[in-house]
Structure formats: C-alpha cells, structure tokens
Image (cartoon, rainbow, N blue to C red):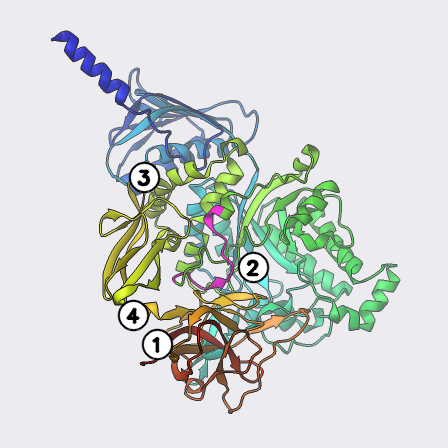
C-alpha cells in the first residue's frame, strides 16, 4: 500500500510541468527561480532604514500600488523586522554600477530589495509590484520565490508626447507618466512648441501664450452657432513644476522641446519681428505639415531665445534640452537679402551651414547653464558642436552618422517608433498615419544597429517612441495609440538582446495588460481581436475567414477553436474572441455575416492606388467617420470584382478641410475636371486612366459636413475586373474621401 502511494506521488511529481517564469516586463537582466512563494497579505509590513527618504519613497510607491491593484493595505515601518517575521525590507547598498540597478530576493519568509541609489530602490519596488500582480486578482498575493539582479541595457528609454497639435491636461500627462513608470521607461520628451501653438508660459514674453495658445480649428470643427470656436490651452509654470516633480518621483526625466529655427509659426505669430519676413504669417496655425516660416538670425532673436531657454531651464532640471531643428525648409532664408548677407558675412557655404551656426549658437547658451543640446537628425547638416546629441528620426542613418562622428545618439526612427501610425490595418483603428506600425514591429527593433561597430554602439543612449498628435484629438486616443506598444519599447530599452523572444513577450502580455487596467490606462485591443473576410459560397451561403492583426493565440467561434474558414448561412451572427494561453485577449466581437457585408468594401479594404501620403482621417463633421486615403492622390481600387452582371453602386463619401502645409514636397494634387459644380465620384474599370463607367454627382454631399450616401449604376462587363474610384473636383479645400462602397449585382 505504501509503495503504491509513493509510486503515485512520484508519477504526479514527474507529470507536473516546470513552473513558468514570472510574468515580468521588461525581462530582468538575471533571474533565478526559487522554491515556494512569499504570502503578501494585509498584515505584511514594509521596513525601511531610518532617515532614508529614497527607500521610504520607494516603499510608499509600492504600498500605494498594492492598495490600488490588489486592495491590500500594508504598513510602512522604520527599522528592522523581528526575527522570523515575514516582511518586506528595503536595504541601502553601496552605490556601485549603473544608477538604475537593483537586487531583489524573494523567499517564502522574506522579501529584500537592495540598491545603492534612489533609482534602483524605485525599480526594485516596481518589479516587486509586478511579481505581486501576476494575475488580475485582488487580496493576498503569492509572490514567487526569485533572485533578481537587474540593470538596464540602455539609459534612455523614452516617449515623446506632442502637446501642441492637440492639448492634454496636466492630469492626463500624469496618467501617461504613471503607465511609463510601471514599465521602467525613464524619459518623457515634452513637445511644447510648434507651428500650431505655444504651450508653455514664458513670463518675459506673455504674448506667446496670449496670442498662440489657442487656435481656430480648420473646417466645421472651428465653428459653433456661426461663431469661431477656439481650441487649445497652455501649461503655467507652476503646473510644469508639478508635472516635472511628479515624473521625477517615478524616475522619469522630462526633457522639454522648444523647436527652432523651423516649426516656428507660433513664435512668429506672437512676435513677428523674430521671423524672417518680419510679418505675421498668413497661413494661420490650423494646418498640419511643414510650414515655410523660419526665425531670422538677428541678435535680438537670440536675445529672445536665450531668455526663453533660461526660463525653460529654470523649470526643467533635465541635463538635456531639445531644440528641435527639424524640417526647417529654406525658401524664406533663400529669398531674404538679410539672410543671404549674413551667410556671406559669416563665411558660410549655404543655408544648411547657417542652420548649423544657428543651432550651435543656441547650444552655447545651454552649455553655459550646464546643459546638453539634443536635436533631431537635421542638426547634423552643416556640422554640430562636439557635445550635441542627435535624435535620429529619418530612419537610422542619422544615428549611424552621429556615432561615427563621436556623437551620442537616440534611436527614434519613423515609422517603426512613430506611434501616430495605426497599429493594425483594420477599420476599427483610430485616426492616424496609414501604414501600420504593429506591436511586433516595435518589439523587433534593435537600437544596437548591425551597421555600427562596437565602439560606435557605445554612443547609442537608447531609443524613444514619438506620439505626434495631429490626428489624435482625445485623451483616450493618446493612451490607445501609446499602449500596448510602449510596453515593447520598455522591454527593448531595458532587457538584454539575448532575451529577445516574441513568443515569451506575448506570453507575458496578458499580465501586462491587466496591470494597465489596474492603473487605469486604456490601450488598443483592435489588433488582438478577430476580424472577418467574406467570400461567396454555393447556394447563397457565405464563407468566413478570421484572423487577428498579430496572428496571436487562438480564435474561438461560438466557444470552439477556429482552425479554418467556415461557411454559414446569410444572417448568421458569430461570437468570436481571441485567447492567449487560455486568457481572453481583446474584446468579444459579434460578427454579422450578411449579404451587405459581403458586397461592401471600406476604404481600409480597398487598395490605395499609389500611397504617397496615406492617412486615416476623420470627416469634417457628423459622425466623424474615419477614412483611409492618400491625401496627395485620393484613389482606391477594388481588386477582382465580378462585373458580369453589372452593379448598383452605393457609396458613402465625406469631405475634410484639407488643412495641410506640404512644405517643399514636389508636385501638386491633380483631380479630374468635374462636369458639375460640386464634382463627382468617378468609377473606372481596368485601370485609373480609362474613361469612367459611372459618375456619381456630389451635389447632395456638398450640402453636408458628415457622411453622405451616393447611388448609381454600372453596366455589365464580362469577367472580373479591377474598379478604380476617384473624385472629380476643384482645388481643395475641401477634399473628398471614400468611406465605403457597396456593389450590389444587378438582377438578371
């Protein structure tokens, strides 16, 4: 009997799978699993050394997050625990190695966080909190026994938030900071000035906020009851100090960006004397894109800049000050006799060298205050000061050039780290740039470029994701465009390249999303969720193919695992959801399989003809539908339509105000000549240069700021053919866009 029991126990032990590694993101540099776990209960106490404010602050952070996430109220005690007491201790060690390093040891009887710095103690608390939130439960947490020795791979793990194009409240910025902190991101670059506004109170120059903190939005959004509607806001110096301190308490440095000499329309609108032309810009501040307005290079302009940067440095203790330097197109400088005379007087070759001189003069002022200049990679053009740091955004070439020249660099390349790009190709995504930058794209980016030598890689400070907000007008969208992609940025920036493993990252993803839920951060679930593609089947039935945007996990349909396309009757409603490791990932979606859905393609389903500048844009009013289009050549293609029976065409169209400054982009937008005053939607067969086979007038749509339904007929043509949709219209604004089109076969 005893032998039978022992044999059964041994068999059970052998059948027990090895414990999975804890779901920590980012992955620590070193982690060793122990046996058992530490029971973290409401009776657990956190001990900190007497007089150690850093340890106490880390303990307070841990206590508060346990209260929020697990509903546990634990106490902080000064001193040492009693012998045998199951407690958490923060221990100060010698400050050796990286300032963000820490050690965390968990046994069944104790938890010890050891670090030599404020930063290390804080990150030890963050990791301990993650260990206590392996699931979404509340109450007592079983913290797995581990020994962790951790240090970051890169010292710059950043996120840039554009508060100019659309404004976020101080409370919203703190929410972003909270979500950054739990993933060990440590730099918030704050984009505070641009062509569309000035967001920072400068006491010496009050007109910067009086004149340019608010603007009238373009199109219908800029009016209410026939009166101008003003949009905007700015941050007082007291608010800035509060945000900077809030971030610092979470080991996040706020790096301000004051963009010069380009992107200066707001400055010149408030103080025209600092502009190259000396007059207030005619374009207003409601357009997106690249304006031509540049600051001049007169001494009084540098007095202005010195004064502004001095106030900025009084507010931001960051060792780095970002001066922009990007997209300063040169037509105004080229046309200015005063600028050309200055180039000759300085013995410079051209306007690029003048911009270099301009940036270096600003940098000299920053250096006098003990700060370092950082700018976008255009600052390389014409040469830069020896201590300048380059943020490479036009791909990675700027980083390579900077490192080879002995300059530090931060990798921030478009499109892989530009979070104004959509996260999947699906129609439910919010507005943004058309080409998706997926979670996988971000995770697979390696800042230690193969093209660099080991010596050059030492100049790579890290990486940064950028969220430009031209098309991100709400706080919710700021969060869901940032997350979950910022989780991937955090792991790439912190964890060793040897631990890079997409499957393991996604294994840990549900726990990461639960933690975002706990801190109240919204995130994008669309890429995880099932989406359907329909095709006709015999006997009037419809075949449904399902996928999610990241090909993750398993899709369940009405509770069963989906493995291949299914054919169902028209009118069927499928209940679908993605599961990863047994946990739901994203929302449950009820998908209606209808004849209308089979016959309809949205702008997301159609091909874009050329893709010069694809954007997913909202229409100018009404339901604010989102449409995918190339704003430089609005043209969509339905591939392989069965045209043998002819069609009734039902198209939904809308317009938007076309508020774009296209800078020095060559060429122009060309449209077909309209045959009616308001224009037409044209349908061509085969290619986009043939004669139209259908022409749907826009007269009805021209009276609306929302979505309008147009109808028309198309004759039968044998076989399958591509159909091309374009608009015949005058010069924008507005510009017309296609939301969706339905092709209903004509009856025999």
Q: Secondary structure at mark 4?
A: helix
Residue 544: image quadrant is: bottom left
Give me the residue at 88% from left, 59% from top.
347
Q: Is residue 61 above or below residue 373?
A: above
Q: Residue furthest front?
A: 718
Which secondary structure dominates the residues rendered in magenta? loop
* Label 1 secondary element: strand
Residue 430 colored magenta? yes
Give the Cα distance between marks 2 and 1: 50 Å
Q: Answer yes or no: do the residues labelled 3 and 4 have beta carbons within 8 Å?
A: no
> Residue 228 appears at what percent x and percent y?
47, 81
User: How far across and how far down the image is residue 502, in percent?
Assistant: 45, 39
Q: Which residue is mark 4?
A: 595
* Disc on the earlier residue, 4 or 2: 2
Between 4 and 707, the one lying in front of the other is: 4
> Can you give x and y, in whole percent of width and height, for residue 368 in the image?
72, 47
- Secondary element under disc 2, as helix, strand or loop, is loop
Image: magenta residue range = 428-440
Q: Residues within 10 Å of mark 4 (few under 14, many from 20)?
A: some
Compared with 60, 518 (above or below) is below
The answer for how far apart the CA atoms under marks 4 and 2 are is 50 Å
Which quadrant holds the N terminus? Answer: top left
Q: Which residue is mark 2?
A: 192
For label 1, the residue is: 744
């Amino acid at each position: 009997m005893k032998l039978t029991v022992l044999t059964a126990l041994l068999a059970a032990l052998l059948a027990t799978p090895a414990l999975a590694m804890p779901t920590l993101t980012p992955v620590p540099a070193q982690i060793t699993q122990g046996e058992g776990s530490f029971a973290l209960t409401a009776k657990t106490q956190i001990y900190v050394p007497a007089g150690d404010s850093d340890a106490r602050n880390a303990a307070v952070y841990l206590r508060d997050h346990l209260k929020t996430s697990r509903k546990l109220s634990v106490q902080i005690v000064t001193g040492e625990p009693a012998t045998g007491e199951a407690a958490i201790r923060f221990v100060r060690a010698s400050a050796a190695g990286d300032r963000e390093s820490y050690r965390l040891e968990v046994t069944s009887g104790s938890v010890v966080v050891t670090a030599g710095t404020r930063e290390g103690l804080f990150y030890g608390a963050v990791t301990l909190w993650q260990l206590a939130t392996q699931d979404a439960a509340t109450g007592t947490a079983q913290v797995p026994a581990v020994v962790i020795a951790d240090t970051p791979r890169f010292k710059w793990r950043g996120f840039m938030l554009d508060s100019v194009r659309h404004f976020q409240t101080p409370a919203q910025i703190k929410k972003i900071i909270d979500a950054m902190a739990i993933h060990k991101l440590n730099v918030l670059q704050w984009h505070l000035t641009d062509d569309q506004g000035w967001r920072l109170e400068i006491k010496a120059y009050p007109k910067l906020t009086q004149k340019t903190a608010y603007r009238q939005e373009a199109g219908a959004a800029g009016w209410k009851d026939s009166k101008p509607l003003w949009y905007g806001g700015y941050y007082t110096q007291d608010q800035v100090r509060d945000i900077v301190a809030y971030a610092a308490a979470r080991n996040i440095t706020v790096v301000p960006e004051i963009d010069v000499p380009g992107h200066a329309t707001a400055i010149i609108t408030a103080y025209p004397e600092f502009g190259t032309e000396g007059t207030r810009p005619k374009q207003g501040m409601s357009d997106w894109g690249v304006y031509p307005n540049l600051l001049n290079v007169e001494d009084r302009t540098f007095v202005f800049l010195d004064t502004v940067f001095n106030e900025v440095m009084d507010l931001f203790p960051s060792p780095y000050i970002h001066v922009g330097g990007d997209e300063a197109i040169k037509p105004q400088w080229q046309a200015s006799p005063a600028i050309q005379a200055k180039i000759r007087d300085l013995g410079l070759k051209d306007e690029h060298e003048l911009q270099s001189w301009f940036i270096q003069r600003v940098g000299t002022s920053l250096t006098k205050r003990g700060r370092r200049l950082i700018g976008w990679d255009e600052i390389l053009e014409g040469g830069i000061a020896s201590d300048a740091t380059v943020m490479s955004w036009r791909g990675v070439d700027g980083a390579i050039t900077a490192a080879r020249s002995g300059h530090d660099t931060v990798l921030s390349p478009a499109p892989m780290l530009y979070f104004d790009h959509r996260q999947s190709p699906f129609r439910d995504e919010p507005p943004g740039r058309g080409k998706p930058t997926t979670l996988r794209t971000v995770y697979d980016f390696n800042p230690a470029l193969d093209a660099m030598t080991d010596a050059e890689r030492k100049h790579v400070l890290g990486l940064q994701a950028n969220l430009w907000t031209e098309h991100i007008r709400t706080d919710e969208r700021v969060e869901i465009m940032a997350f979950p992609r910022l989780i991937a940025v955090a792991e790439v920036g912190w964890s060793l390249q040897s631990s890079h493993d997409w499957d393991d990252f996604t294994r840990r993803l549900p726990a990461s999303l639960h933690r975002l839920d706990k801190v109240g951060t919204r995130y994008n679930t669309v890429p995880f969720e099932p989406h359907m593609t329909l095709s006709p089947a015999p006997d009037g039935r419809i075949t449904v193919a399902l996928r999610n945007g990241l090909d993750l996990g398993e899709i369940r349909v009405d509770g069963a695992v989906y493995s291949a396309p299914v054919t169902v009757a028209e009118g069927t409603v499928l209940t679908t959801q993605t599961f990863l490791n047994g946990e739901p990932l994203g929302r449950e979606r009820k998908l209606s399989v209808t004849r209308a859905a089979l016959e309809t393609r949205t702008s997301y389903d159609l091909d874009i003809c050329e893709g010069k500048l694809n954007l997913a844009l909202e229409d100018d009013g009404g339901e604010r539908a989102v449409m995918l289009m190339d704003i430089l050549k609005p043209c969509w293609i339905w591939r392989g339509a069965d045209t043998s029976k002819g069609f009734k065409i039902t198209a939904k169209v809308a317009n938007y105000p076309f508020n774009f400054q296209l800078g020095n982009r060559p060429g122009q937008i060309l449209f077909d000549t309209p045959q009616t005053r308001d224009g037409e939607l044209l349908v061509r067969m085969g290619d986009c240069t043939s004669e139209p086979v259908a022409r749907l007038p826009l007269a009805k749509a021209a009276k609306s700021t929302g979505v309008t339904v147009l109808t028309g007929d198309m004759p039968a043509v044998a076989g399958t053919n591509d159909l091309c949709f374009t608009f015949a219209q005058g010069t924008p604004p507005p510009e017309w866009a296609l939301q969706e089109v339905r092709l209903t076969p004509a009856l025999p």
